[in-house]
Amino acid sequence: MDKRTRWYHGSPHDIRVLREGSTITPWCDLARVFSHKPTLVCISDDLRIRHNGELPGYLYQIDDTVGPDDVIPHPRTTMAPGDEWLTQRALGLRLIGPTEIRSAETLSATDITELLTHRSQDSCSQE
């Protein structure tokens, strides 16, 4: 792990310190999507993210140096290796800004039904 990696967190809450055990990612767009509190996230082969989150939120960059002892791979992730990590200590945050749901990323009820009945969990992660 490179200490120069930028880490991000998305939340529907206005916070300044991230608690130990929280999820962070080096993928800014994924953190933005998680700020909407989705229960289903789908990432296509071309890395297009779709989700069913419904809340406005906030995107943060981790404001502390993150070393190899500060994070572990998320043990229950269904995403690609390296996409989701759990913090091993509290970390300071810097607010990047508020987030809004992008209509092009929103899964419809029909999309969700089709995904859950016809596709493998390799393409979608259910929280």
Image (cartoon, helix red, strand yellow):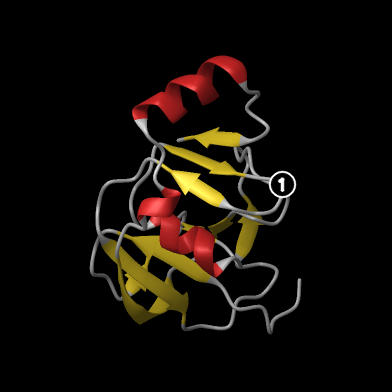
**Residue at the right extreme?**
1
- Tell me the SS state at disc 1: loop
Which residue is located at x 34 percent, y 73 percent?
A: 17
- Name the residue at 24% across, 62% down: 13
Left or right of 13 in this view: 19: right
Quadrant containing the C terminus is top left
Q: Amino acid at mark 1?
A: Asp
Is any part of residue 104 visible from this angle? yes
Task: Measuring from the top left, give residue 49's x and y in whole percent.
Answer: 54, 51
Q: Whole-percent x and y of residue 90?
A: 43, 69
Report the residue marked by disc 1: 45
Q: Quadrant of residue 32?
A: bottom left
Q: Quadrant of the N terminus?
A: bottom right
Q: Is residue 98 above or below residue 121?
A: below
- The foreground one among 17 and 79 is 79
Q: State the residue in front, 89 or 94.
A: 94
59 left or right of 49? Answer: left
Q: Nearer the viewer, residue 37 or 93?
A: 37
Identify the residue at image location x=65%, y=23%.
Answer: 120
